[in-house]
Amino acid sequence: MNDNRDCSEQKPATVEQVSHPAKPNLTQAFYDRISHVYDLIADGGEHEARERGLRQLAVQPGESVLEIGYGTGHSLVQLAQAVGPSGQVTGVDLSSGMHDVASKRVSEANLQSRVRLLVGEVPPLPFSDDQFDVVTMSFTLELFPLNVIPEVLHECRRVLRPGGRLGIVSMAKVPDDETESLLEKTYVWMHQHFPHIVDCQPIPLEQLLTEAGFTLSVHERISLFTMPVAVVVARWGSIAGCRLVYRWSGQSAGSSW
């Protein structure tokens, strides 16, 4: 096959509708509306944390990877490049608008043969037990209600193979011995009072992962516009040579809006 052929002639990445909400989903409608401008709105701040998470996850050739909440597809491309021709990347996202943007990005990178894209609500995850070497999500877990996050993590654990890796980048709560910044206090207040506008919230990621039965192998914190972001790699099942890294970076990830 000639890999230099015009990408416009190639088939788009595979898409499957895996669930249909029983009632209108406001989150889905919101991301459908902003999908084509999402990178302009948010990627300037998120990309550094997302990139750091991918570096720590260190996906290897031949691995099977699941991304939950693939958004506009930046990570899909990097993951597909990392797994190589013998690997496979699967993505699931709530928004069909995000799917369209991500599918275009994957096709333009000529990587659609390695990528399978699904559209639907989670949990549950529409996959069999022990299916993936890696599960990853970036700025996605904190979109779920707090009472749903344990179920999401349980599903991640179920679809991971023994010893598999879960990589998460998320907004995080400040440690107990530190004070929230004014911006974080405002953000939390906005989420509590206007969740349809500010749809995510800082979460105690490390605690949630430990309670779900995962063991942290990499743990970093960086600052995004004075708000803490957790970059974590956790393992499920048998673990050998596990290492713990905890670093705090006071530098802002990207320029302020």
Image (spheres, grey):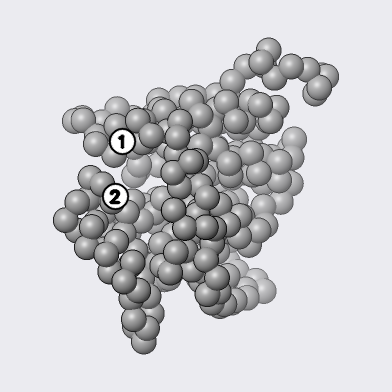
- Residue kind at label 1, given as amino acid type: Phe
For marks 1 and 2 on the same chain, the one whose residue lies earlier in the sequence: 1
Mark 2 Cα-neighbour bin, 10 Å: few <14, some 14–19, many ≥20:
some
Q: Is residue 111 left or right of residue 17?
A: right
In this view, 190 is above or below 183: above
Q: Residue at x 38, y 34 (%)?
A: 34
- Residue kind at label 2, given as amino acid type: Asp
Q: Position of residue 199 (x, y in %)?
A: 29, 50
Q: Position of residue 139 (x, y in %)?
A: 44, 53
In this view, 240 is above or below 193: below
Q: Can residue 164 be seen in the rendering of this structure?
A: no
Q: Position of residue 190 (x, y in %)?
A: 23, 57
Q: Can residue 96 be seen in the rendering of this structure?
A: yes
Whether pointer 1 and pointer 2 mark residues with C-beta atoms closer than 8 Å, the reply is: yes
The count of marks equals 2
- Quarter the N terminus occupies: top right
- How far apart marks 1 and 2 lie (CA) works out to 10 Å
Q: Residue 199: which disc?
A: 2
Q: Residue at x 60, y 30 (%)?
A: 105
Q: Is residue 243 left or right of residue 98?
A: right
Q: Position of residue 217 (x, y in %)?
A: 57, 71
Q: Which residue is mark 1?
A: 30
Residue at disc 2, secondary structure: loop
Q: Nearer the viewer, residue 78 or 38?
A: 38
Q: Residue furthest top?
A: 9
Q: Nearer the viewer, residue 252 or 99?
A: 252
Q: Residue furthest left?
A: 193
Residue at disc 1, secondary structure: helix
Q: Is residue 197 left or right of residue 247?
A: left
Q: Nearer the viewer, residue 32 or 127?
A: 32
